[in-house]
Amino acid sequence: MAEKICVAVRVRPPISQDSSSGIFWRVEDNRISLHKLHGSPISGISYAFDYVFDETCSNAKVYELLTKDVIHAAVDGFNGTAFAYGQTSSGKTFTMNGSPNDPGIIHRAVNDIFQKIQMISDREFLIRVSYMEIYNEEINDLFAVENQKLQIHESLERGIFVAGLREEIVNNAEQVIKLLESGEVNRHFGETNMNARSSRSHTIFRMVIESKGTDIHSSGDYSSCDAIRVSVLNLVDLAGSERIAKTGADGVRLKEGKYINKSLMVLGNVINKLSNGAKQRAHIPYRDSKLTRILQTALGGNAKTSIICTLAPEEVHVEETKGTLLFASRAKRITNCAQVNEILTDAALLKRQQLEIEELRRKLQGSRSEVLEQEILKLRNDMLKYELEREKLETELEEERRSHKEREQRLRDQQLKIETLSSLVSDGDRSSSQGSMKESPTDECNYRGDGFKTPCFKAAGNVFVAMRSNNSELPDFSPLPDSFSNVADEDTWFKMNKGYVADFDSLQTTPARKVQSFPPQDITPDCSNDNYKEELQNLKRQLELVIKEKNKLERKHEEEVQLNGRLMGEISELKQELDVSNNSLEASKERYGSLEREFQLLKEERDSLLKSVSESSKKLTFVTDQKENILKDLNWEVQRRKDLEAEIKQFSVAFASRQRSLASIHGEFKSKIEKLRAENPVPLHKSLQY
Ligand code: ADP
Ligand code: MG
């Protein structure tokens, strides 16, 4: 959407006490005008802008009103540029960089961007920053002192860019601020008079904000989600405009010198041309300076741009201030057309293709067996082939039938002709016997000087009657003998054709059959019987020839009939074959179906078998375990038995020896008792007590 560049003017607080106090700048709302002290405004020097900030205005307010929208738009994918223009010491650096108490636009923008992207949950961001200085038309990298005199390039993907410029990927505002500080240190590097340099150099702080959607699945449309937004934000602190303002604004010839800042001068020209409207915008000299080339998109292109023009209020600077105001009012007329920069990266394309491939694969798997489809396709093709062959044979047969019919027709004609000739011959015989002859001198037939008329015969399908014109030559061959004397009147022809009237056109197309031609003879109307006989002979010969031909044709016809029969047989065979192949196709389809079913069944069976096998193997392990346990028990039992047996054996041995010893003791006792009894006999009752 076309929109004007946003332009604001900012008046800094006065630094020195003005000695003269004749005039001053008055700020009212969004208007600034030059006034006489305690007096009326000076006519013609009054300008209105989007905003006019007086000396009490803080950087916070400037940011809020002038730059915030550009910064937020940059997060949303629009290119953005904010730059400060004005003479040296008018407050450009104060506006862009600020002070510890009141941070400038750059600091505020950086903080704002990181705050904003943290609130956007459905996109992920990648932010790169670079910091450069254009000094004496040379681009130097403020992040890397070694990167000096860098070149500007242009490419389709990146647009206009500074080759070799260091870009730092940053994750938070603090990191950026630190980098900026280090950049300032580099700027001081090797430069004794910092202020002199800064008034002649431009600094461009650039942020490249890339973002892409994080949630692919919610929208379903991966094209928009995968699109990457890339926006470039330039925050520019320009060189002092004092010389340029004078020359550029008033058109006074520029005084050449080493302090002239080419970039700033070209910037003035570019703004001038852009502000002149569409007519003069044919050529804008962006390429004339490094600054305008880098800011090309920001000036009259795809960018949201805001310019802050800083003014020094002192009376001593009034001319410079006027120049700055002129620049600002021209810039106000520039229209830009900003749009979101969306690009599809290779990765995004790849992702999209991968998704498509996945989908296709899913579709392929979802369809029925590929093999079956192919088989059916093949069979269908075969069927089509057979069908075509059949059709071809049918047309051939049709053709054959037609030609057969034609031949038959021709034969019939021949037959008729022969019959006619035969009847003519017999008529001739009769008339010759009567000795009279018909004559018609008015006939249109070829009439020879001697009065003998020769009819012209041509066989043509079912037509063979015509008269030869008077001028026509005799043909080389003729269907009938030319020397026909008595049949030349029209009535006879009419009779012969059974009412058929000859068509001359069809006569022309009929191929003439070579029949022996009989040269005309000098025959007078009252010719002799010998002549007739001779002629009859001739006619008979002719007839024989015709009959021969007829026989030949009949033979040929028979042959063709046979051929037809053969062809029919072949066709029916082919049909049968086709039926067979159709049947086999059906059968194979059925077989396939049954096989598939069988396969399914087998699969199920296999599954159940596998299940039972696993169950039985489980059981087996259980049983094996049990068996092992039992075996262990058994072994233990056997061992125990063996031990017991050994014990029993020991016991029995001990028992036997004990028994033996007891028996011997008993024997001893017995013998001792016997001996004692024998030594001391006791009464019987005592011995019984004992
Ligand atoms: P420039 O960059 O245009 O040469 P500076 O930003 O360096 O000018 O400003 C010159 C001086 O004026 C600095 O000391 C700065 O602090 C002071 N100054 C500029 N603008 C303001 C302002 N709006 N409020 C307070 N001080 C300011
Ligand atoms: Mg400065």
Image (spheres, rainbow, N blue to C red):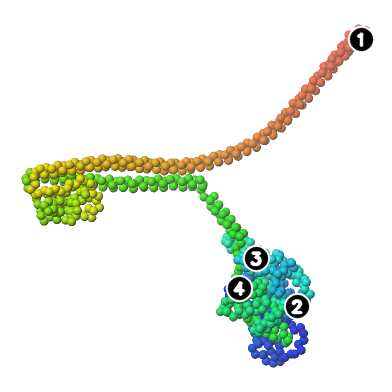
**Mark 3 to mark 1 CA distance (whole Å):** 136 Å
Residue type at mark 1: give it. Leu
Residue type at mark 3: give it. Glu
**Mark 4 to mark 1 CA distance (whole Å):** 155 Å
- Say if 346 sits above or below 193 in the image: above
Q: What residue is at 70 percent from the left and 82 percent from the top? A: 242
Expressed as whole percent of the image width and height from the top left, the position of residue 67 reads 67, 75
Viewer-nearest residue: 567 or 343: 567
Give the number of the mark in front: 4 or 3: 4
Residue named by callout 3: 210
Q: Residue 196 — which label?
A: 2
Give the number of the mark in front: 2 or 3: 2
Q: What residue is at 10 percent from the left and 43 percent from the top? A: 530
Residue 565 in the figure: left or right of residue 417: right
Q: Residues within 10 Å of mark 3 (few under 14, many from 20)?
A: many
Expressed as whole percent of the image width and height from the top left, the position of residue 492 reads 13, 50
State yes or no: Cβ of the residue under disc 4 lies below 8 Å from any atom of ligand 1: no
Give the number of the mark in front: 1 or 2: 2
**Mark 4 to mark 2 CA distance (whole Å):** 32 Å
Q: What residue is at 26 percent from the left and 42 percent from the top? A: 557
Q: Residue 676 — which label?
A: 1
The mark that comes first in sequence, 4 or 3, is 3
